[in-house]
Amino acid sequence: MLRSLVGSEMCIRDSVQVVARLRPFLPNETQDRCVRAEGENIGLLQQGGNEEHMFAFDRCYSEQSEQEAIYTNELAPLVSKVSEGFNATLFCYGVTGSGKTYTMSGLIDRAIAQCLALPGYAVRVSYFQILNERLQDLLSDSGEQELQVREKDGRLVIPGATDTSIDSLAMFEAVLERASSNRTTAHTNSNEASSRSHAVLKIQVESPTVTGTLNLIDLAGSEDNRVTGNSGARLVESANINRSLFNLGKVIDALNSKSSHVPYRESKLTRVLQDSLGGQAHTVMIVNLPPGVPFYHHVLNTCLLYTSDAADEEDSVDIWGPRLTQKKKHHKRQVVKS
């Protein structure tokens, strides 16, 4: 089942695909592993013990996975849906330093290229960050000005937002460079240049008869301030990041339980994405995981967001070297059937 980081229980629909990607060790990290990928499962070795927790996702990608494979399997089908007039959203989720931005960087250019290759479609892009619950235009010279989300003729609009038409990858690269330079980052103990905001890239494709929107969301990392060493402004940002991620879970839960009230307005992120979450929209969440022991609790909490308890079983696993006999505890996503 989907669980919040503060313990309330939620569920996630079959239509929201949740996949895991394990990043490799970084050059400055001690290669003391506690996470591995096996098929569609993530294995997490309990600290100081011999119990391995297995977490089942829709799909898993090991640290040897290529960006092209992730794009082909996860994002290319969403672009196809957008060209049919649906809205779609792909999130990159994980703790600070888990590889979210790296994963997203391998997907964006490929998505733009696929959109530009659609015959008879015009492509427009806008780029925002959500910093401390303020929506800001990353393509504007006055980027710190807060934008508002409005409804007009049954559609969400963002008055004053920069909306740029592109017809080549070169044009988009100029847009991306401008947006990246305007996004807010800062040093924490977990990441030299930690993203302090959610980045929201909206790609609209339009033909004479069809309009669809693809949202690519590089989420700011969920943070444990005991690890990151945040204080002052960083602490405020961290609180807003974690609150926003929690509210995203609440919205998904309300949609899946067919609640009469969906709390889109409790978070600027879900308000911006209101027409692309639920209904006929398509959503993929890529959960990014680091492999090392220092991230054990982060990985456990992240995996528990999308899994439920299952029976224990004894198994022999040689991946852990001398720790040969592991007691495996399996976890599976609990899906609410619509």
Image (spheres, rainbow, N blue to C red):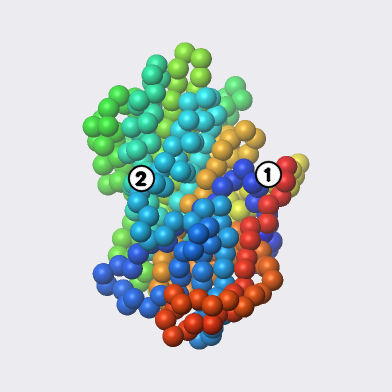
Q: Position of residue 331 (x, y in %)?
A: 62, 65
The residue that label 1 is drawn on is 255
Q: Residue furthest right?
A: 260
Q: Callout 2: helix, strand or loop?
A: helix
Residue drawn at x 55%, y 29% is 86
- Left or right: residue 254 versus residue 75 is right
Q: Position of residue 132 (x, y in %)?
A: 46, 53
Q: Callout 1: helix, strand or loop?
A: helix
Closer to us: 305 or 194: 305
- Left or right: residue 48 versus residue 117 is right
Name the amino acid, label 2: Glu
Q: Residue furthest top?
A: 208
Callout 2: 10 Å neighbours few (<14), some, many (20+)? few
> In the figure, 31 relative to 104: above or below?
below
Image quadrant where residue 325 sits: bottom right
> In the figure, 310 relative to 15: above or below?
below
Name the amino acid, label 1: Leu
Closer to us: 305 or 66: 66
Q: Kindly identify which numbered label has been placed on residue 68.
A: 2
The tag earlier along the polypeptide, 1 or 2, is: 2
